[in-house]
DNA sequence: AATGAAATTAAACAGCTGTTTAATTTAAAC
DNA sequence: GTTTAAATTAAACAGCTGTTTAATTTCATT
């Protein structure tokens, strides 16, 4: 059981525990979720959590590490595009679809960043951001070389992208209340499309070189 | 002690408890902060918290209510401006300075929104956002009438503004690491200025009517 | 100095916390 | 069928949780 955290080959049961814990941690916070809550939701004995993950904190760390991996930008997803604008769009799409596929993880990542009690997770989150910001910087510089972009601070671009994305999910209730959906349209799908369009428009507005 | 929550006239000691609780709730979360933590930091007896605020949850609710009030947009701050662009800038400045003056509150507000266990606070946060979005909408429409703005969804504008603001604070560590500060410049001040400039530029880029 | 309300205290309360134990069951390997 | 390791269980552990109690102190008003 000690080599587990290096090997990371998880069986069905472990994956299910992770999935349920992820949801509960996101909804009620780490301290707001007891191991008995998780055990009840996963229909297992409480001791199984410590048996598989050694501690509640280690369970969280496993979730955070996996989550950070999902959000990590990889050049493969956009490097084939010639047009810098399209590269930027691929990056935006990567973030949004990652966030959709891992609904709860980023909520946990963001919360763990502010919580000073568990610095390990905060470090993982910081490393993730530094990595992604670096790649965004390269795309911006690429766009500048091509004369399509004006230069703009990649940290600020990244901040606006992630910030908008995160806050968008929190506005769900307001959207539901103020929005009159086009008939026969799935709500989740609509949110996804609206956010994608908005982010592409916003980043283009910031980066587009007016002298072109 | 029962009329307290309607009158809201708090003495020195109560204000200090609120201030310390606010900081701890923001840093470690509501469940991550025990009443004994608060009592220790405030150098008071544990029982005083229940004596003054009836319950831990009520203490949080008081903080949330006061915090929401601080972020509430009031037209007085921008209505005197003729230029729609300047009205928008006043709104941005209001948000940033409110956030600076109440460093921890918005962190709590944002967290409380996601936590499903305490719907009351979530409702307060939703009401606040609906109110502010409505005012932003009016400013956008005002700008459209004057021919300065193109129309753009106020919810999206609001989302990008708040999202960028919140996420900016979380990038502090990265700024500290990657930034070479101009000599003789206070860090906090630099952040404040950078964020203000960035937000004004971003929102203007989105809203500016190209046909002007 | 006496009165009485407000403030403060230490101690106790029941209930929940994460974790460990030791016993039992399951299931695959020989 | 026996052996052996992995999985699962109920129970107990010590420590912490928010809250209440009942006694004491503080302090301004009479």
Image (cartoon, coloured by chain):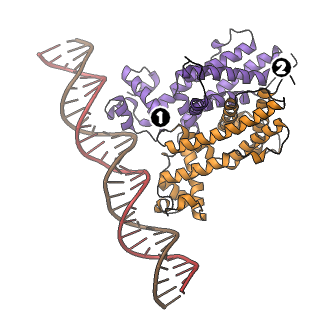
Chain colours: A purple, B orange, C brown, D red
Q: Kindly identify which numbered label has been placed on residue A25.
A: 1
Q: Quadrant of the C terminus of chain B?
A: top right
Q: Does residue A118 show up?
A: yes
Q: Is residue B76 above or below residue A190?
A: below
Q: Is residue B54 above or below residue A157?
A: below
| Residue position marked by numbered label 2 in the rendering | A209
Picture coordinates of residue B153 (x, y %)? 70, 28
Q: Which dot marks residue B164?
A: none
Q: Toward the viewer: C14 or B152? A: B152
Q: In the structure shown, which secondary structural element does the residue marked by tag 2 occupy?
A: loop
> What residue sits 65% from the left and 25% below the top?
A131
What residue is at 75 percent from the left and 11 percent from the top? A83
Q: Secondary structure at mark 1?
A: helix
Marks 2, 1 in one chain: yes
Q: Residues within 10 Å of mark 1 (few under 14, many from 20)?
A: many
**Closest to the observer, C10 or B111:** B111
Instruction: Name the subunit of mark 1.
Output: A
Image position of A4 (left or right of B33) = left
- The image quadrant of residue A17 is top left
> Residue B49 at x, y = what percent?
49, 59
Chain of the residue under label 2? A
Observer-nearest residue: A196 or B74? B74
């Amino acid at each position: 059981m000690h080599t587990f955290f290096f090997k990371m080959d998880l069986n069905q049961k472990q994956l299910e525990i992770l999935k349920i814990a992820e949801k509960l941690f996101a909804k009620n916070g780490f301290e707001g979720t007891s191991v008995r809550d998780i055990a009840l939701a996963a229909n297992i004995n409480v001791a199984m959590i410590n048996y598989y993950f050694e501690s509640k904190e280690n369970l969280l760390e496993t979730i955070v590490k996996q989550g950070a991996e999902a959000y990590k930008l990889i050049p493969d997803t956009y490097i084939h595009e010639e047009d810098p604008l399209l590269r930027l769009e691929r990056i935006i799409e990567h973030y949004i679809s990652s966030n959709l596929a891992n609904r709860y993880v980023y909520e946990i990542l963001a919360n763990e960043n502010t919580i000073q009690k568990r610095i390990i997770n905060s470090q993982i989150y910081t490393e993730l951001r530094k990595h992604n910001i670096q790649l965004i910087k390269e795309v911006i510089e690429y766009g500048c070389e091509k004369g399509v972009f004006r230069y703009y601070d990649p940290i600020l671009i990244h901040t606006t992208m992630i910030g908008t994305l995160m806050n968008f999910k929190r506005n769900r209730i307001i959207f539901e209340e103020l929005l009159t959906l086009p008939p026969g349209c799935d709500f989740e799908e609509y949110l996804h499309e609206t956010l994608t369009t908005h982010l592409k428009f916003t980043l283009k507005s910031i980066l587009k070189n007016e002298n072109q």
